[in-house]
Amino acid sequence: MRRVRQYSLLWICVLVAIPMLTATSDPTSHAPSPAKFLTSGAQDFWPCFSPDGTHILFSRREGETWKLFVVPLSGGPPQLLTRVPLSVSATRANWSVRTNSVAFTGTSQKGESRIWIINGDGTNPRELVLNGLSDQMFYPSWFPSGEQIAAMDAQEMVIKRLDIHTGVVTTITDRNKVLTGMPSVSPNGAWIAFAGQEYHGQKYDQTQNIIWIADESGVARPVEANPGQGRAPTWSPDGKRLAFESNRGSSVGLYAIFLINRDGTGLTQITDQDLNADHPVWSPDGSRLAFSARPSIRTKDRSIALTEVPQ
């Protein structure tokens, strides 16, 4: 075990300021983009692209556990990523462009969830053992260096930065101000977008989340001046836009994928709510989004789908 230094809010310096937020109105009128389904007949969630953009990694439920699969964008049957059986259920993966390593949440049979790392070729799975982490760690997101990870500590309801080389764990957000959900590190490492809710003594309820951005000092602000419900944000490769899921506008709580500029302008809905889509991720070239959705209103299956990003 390595010694851990924790900081409640401040990092050493603030290099980039968050742009001033502007008001948002109703989503821009845009015909929902058609979805191309890559998987079927299962429960498939949490997609992410391979660094070269040719495959999508995702979690598939098999019995009482979750396993990591990859499917080519060109089509074909999904294949297991792992070369050896894992001792944990594997969910919420994030693939580092710099190191070709995959970070994911590994959940034991006892319900303990920790951050694991595996090589991109499916070899050498290992738990990231650091002081200062609870046994409820979710949604790892790589910093661009491939040496740090942001993750949600669901026990403390904060986002933490994990340095896998030095062993230092830093608390980024302030639980007394905002309860946090899934984080996403910007391509330049200057911001972290996350789903969360302002804290007023209430219990955390992810259905009440909105989209936030935190700067390097840990100061967090809503992306939208008049926020609507939103979860699971991810950054475009150029760092100018966010994709996220939201049930805004649905009388029955179905989710669609939305885009928004990082300054809070340009809100656009890009999938039909009948898909009940969630957890969007960008392709490396920014031209497409992958997400989990239902292929039909008559099935309970969840499949991995693709759609083109409107420019």
Image (cartoon, rainbow, N blue to C red):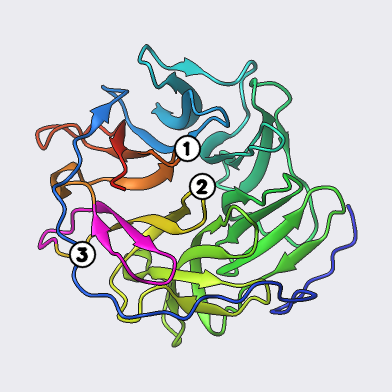
Residue 88 drawn at (x, y percent): 59, 34
Are circles 2 and 1 on residues that touch, CB within 8 Å?
yes
* Outermost top residue: 76
Give the prevailing secondary structure in the magenta stretch.
Answer: loop
Is residue 71 shown above or below 275? Answer: above
Labels 3 and 1: the sequence-earlier one: 3
Q: What label sits on residue 1 in the rendered view?
A: none
Left or right: residue 239 compared with residue 188: left
Residue 154 drawn at (x, y percent): 55, 62
Label 1: which residue? 285
In the rendered image, residue 169 lying in the magenta stretch gets the answer no
Are circles 3 and 1 on residues that touch, CB within 8 Å?
no
* First to last magenta residue range: 250-269
Q: Secondary structure at mark 2?
A: loop
Q: Residues within 10 Å of mark 3 (few under 14, many from 20)?
A: some
Is residue 110 shown above or below 28? Answer: above
* Camera-nearest label, 3 or 1: 1
The part of the image, by quadrant, that contains residue 128 is top right
Q: What label sits on residue 237 in the rendered view?
A: 2
Labels 3 and 2: the sequence-earlier one: 3
Spatial CA distance of label 3 from label 2 is 22 Å
Is there any visible trace of residue 187 in the rendered image? yes
Label 3: which residue? 27
Amino acid at dot 1: Asp
